[in-house]
Image (tube, rainbow, N blue to C red):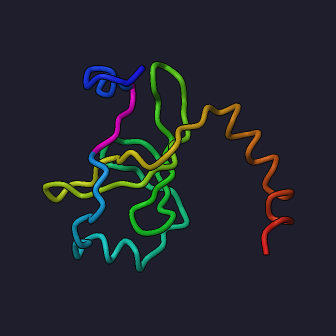
Amino acid sequence: MPKTKKDLSSSDSDSGPDDKNPPPPSKKSKSADNSAKQSSSSGSDGNLEWLLEGKRFVKINEFRGRQMIDIREYYEKDGELKPGKKGISLSTTQWKKLCGLVDEINSKLH
């Protein structure tokens, strides 16, 4: 059965627009790209965050009383970075399981 417009919009996602051509990076974003942060910093919302590359971040958030690890690509709108659709939120249990698989995954990489 095809989804109606109402079905498509009833998502729990905190996503923004899925732009095919995102706006060019601002001067602020370029400086963030060049100085790859390896230590944590507090974001504008007070949560811990780490820059992976470009506009991709790892953040520790709280959602419905549960601590989540959010790996997400952000987009810029009105001079402000906003979370996009591209990403995943992991529970602490899922995060710990992924961390336990790191050595095995690394051994399979070229």
Q: Position of residue 7 (x, y in %)?
A: 33, 21
Q: Main secondary structure of the magenta part?
A: loop
Depth check: give the residue in front, 17 or 105: 17
Q: Is 24 located above or below residue 100 in the figure? A: below
Residue 76 location, x and y as percent?
Answer: 24, 58
Instruction: Work out which residue is located at the far left of the displayed protein and give it.
Output: 78
Residue 56 versus residue 4: which sits nearer the camera? 4
> Which quarter of the rendered picture does the C terminus lie within?
bottom right
Q: Is residue 65 above or below residue 32?
A: above
Image position, residue 86 (x, y; %): 44, 49
Residue at 80% over, 64% down: 106
For residue 103: magenta? no
Magenta-drawn segment: 12-16
- Image point (59%, 37%), residue name: 90
**Residue 5 appears left or right of 61:** left
Quadrant, the N terminus: top left
Q: Residue 35 in the image: x percent, y percent?
A: 43, 77
Residue 13 shown in magenta? yes
State the residue lying farthest toward the front: 1
